[in-house]
Image: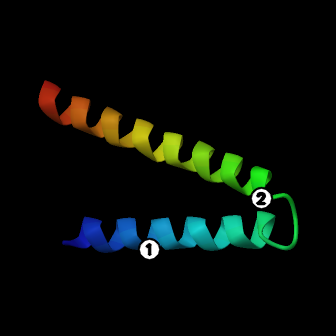
Amino acid sequence: MGYKILGYAVWNGAKWYVKQRYGGGGSSTRRYVALGVLAVGVGALVVKGTSHRNAS
């Protein structure tokens, strides 16, 4: 249960950061690129965690 709350906090914090950094009247393309990079990073962490758990 604690990991779910932590994940929720990290996800919403990242969304807030991206909105603050790229949301202020800038190019929407930059915002989508930043969100894509963030999604790929989170996906890589999930895959790494899953493969590490299966190896043990």
Residue on which disc 2 sits: 28
The answer to whether mark 2 and mark 1 are in CB contact below 8 A is no
Which picture quadrant has residue 43? top left
Is residue 9 found left or right of 22 in the rendered image? left
Mark 2, secondary structure of its residue: helix
Front one among 43 and 52: 43
Is residue 6 found left or right of 23 in the rendered image? left
For residue 13, above or below residue 43: below
Amino acid type of disc 1?
Answer: Ala
Mark 2 or mark 1: whose residue is earlier in sequence: 1
Rendered location of residue 10, percent (x, y): 47, 66
What residue is drawn where x is 37% and y is 65%?
Answer: 7
Label 2 or label 1, whichever lies nearer to me, is 2
What residue is drawn where x is 58% and y is 65%?
Answer: 14
Determine the CA span between mark 2 and mark 1: 24 Å
Is residue 17 found left or right of 45 in the rendered image? right
Mark 1, secondary structure of its residue: helix
Rendered location of residue 4, percent (x, y): 27, 68
For the N terminus, the quadrant is: bottom left
Residue 18: which disc? none
Residue on which disc 1 sits: 9
For residue 49, above or below residue 2: above
Which picture quadrant has residue 48? top left
Amino acid type of disc 2?
Answer: Ser
Front one among 6 and 35: 35
For the C terminus, the quadrant is: top left
Front one among 49 and 43: 43
Q: Is residue 56 visible?
A: no
Rendered location of residue 26, percent (x, y): 87, 64
